[in-house]
């Protein structure tokens, strides 16, 4: 199975740290949505979107990337890191539904920012 995770990890870098740990175990493609605004995801069986929680939701960069690049009818999962508030995933879930994709699961990871540096 071929899978990719498109991510945004700018503030403390916690999301990228989590993804790097996952990448050590699994063969996958990581796509930094700041560096790559477009990507052909049609060849992937499974697509993840990962972000820290910014103002209570996924980053605008990941949401825009999903809106512009997510192909129809794919399996999708979500990963978010957060401090005090896990936030909501309504906007990105709406994009997943509009693309007729199946949300397979979500994972939230609380990070203690004073330990994250």
Image (cartoon, grey):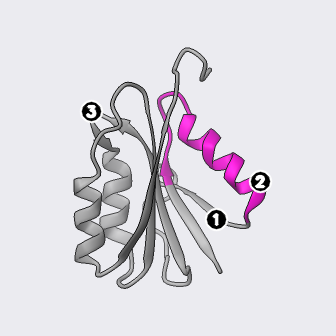
Report how far apart the C-alphas of labels 1 and 3 lie in the structure: 27 Å
Quarter holding the C terminus is top right
Q: Name the residue under label 3.
A: 55
Residues at marks 3 and 2 touching, judged by CB atoms closer than 8 Å:
no
Where is residue 91? Give x, y as percent: 23, 56
Residue 12 colored magenta? yes
Is 50 displayed left or right of 3 in the figure?
left
Query: Which structural element holds mark 1?
Result: strand
> Residue 25 falls in which quadrant of the image?
bottom right
Q: Which of 13 and 111 is in front in this view?
A: 111
What's the residue at 30%, 39% (across, down)? 87
Where is residue 36? Give x, y as percent: 50, 58
Report how far apart the C-alphas of labels 3 and 2 lie in the structure: 30 Å
| Labels in figure, total | 3
Residues at marks 1 and 3 touching, judged by CB atoms closer than 8 Å:
no
Q: Mark 2 points at which residue?
A: 24
Q: Which of marks 1 and 2 is in front?
A: 2
Query: Which structural element holds mark 2?
Result: helix
Q: Mark 1 points at which residue?
A: 29
Residues at marks 1 and 2 touching, judged by CB atoms closer than 8 Å:
no
104 relative to 80, above or below? below
Query: Which structural element holds mark 3?
Result: loop
Where is residue 88? Give x, y as percent: 27, 45
Majority secondary structure in the magenta region: helix
Earlier sequence position, callout 3 versus callout 2:
2
Q: Give the range drawn in magenta.
A: 7-26
Report how far apart the C-alphas of labels 1 and 2 lie in the structure: 12 Å
């Amino acid at each position: 199975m071929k899978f990719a995770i498109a991510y945004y990890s700018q503030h403390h870098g916690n999301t990228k740290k989590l993804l790097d740990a996952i990448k050590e175990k699994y063969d996958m493609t990581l796509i930094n949505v700041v560096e790559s605004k477009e990507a052909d995801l049609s060849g992937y069986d499974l697509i993840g979107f990962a972000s820290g929680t910014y103002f209570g939701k996924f980053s605008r960069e990941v949401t825009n990337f999903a809106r512009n690049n997510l192909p129809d009818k794919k399996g999708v999962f979500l990963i978010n890191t957060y401090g005090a508030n896990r936030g909501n995933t309504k906007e990105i879930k709406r994009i997943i539904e509009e693309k007729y994709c199946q949300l397979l699961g979500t994972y939230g990871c609380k990070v203690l920012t004073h330990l994250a540096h």
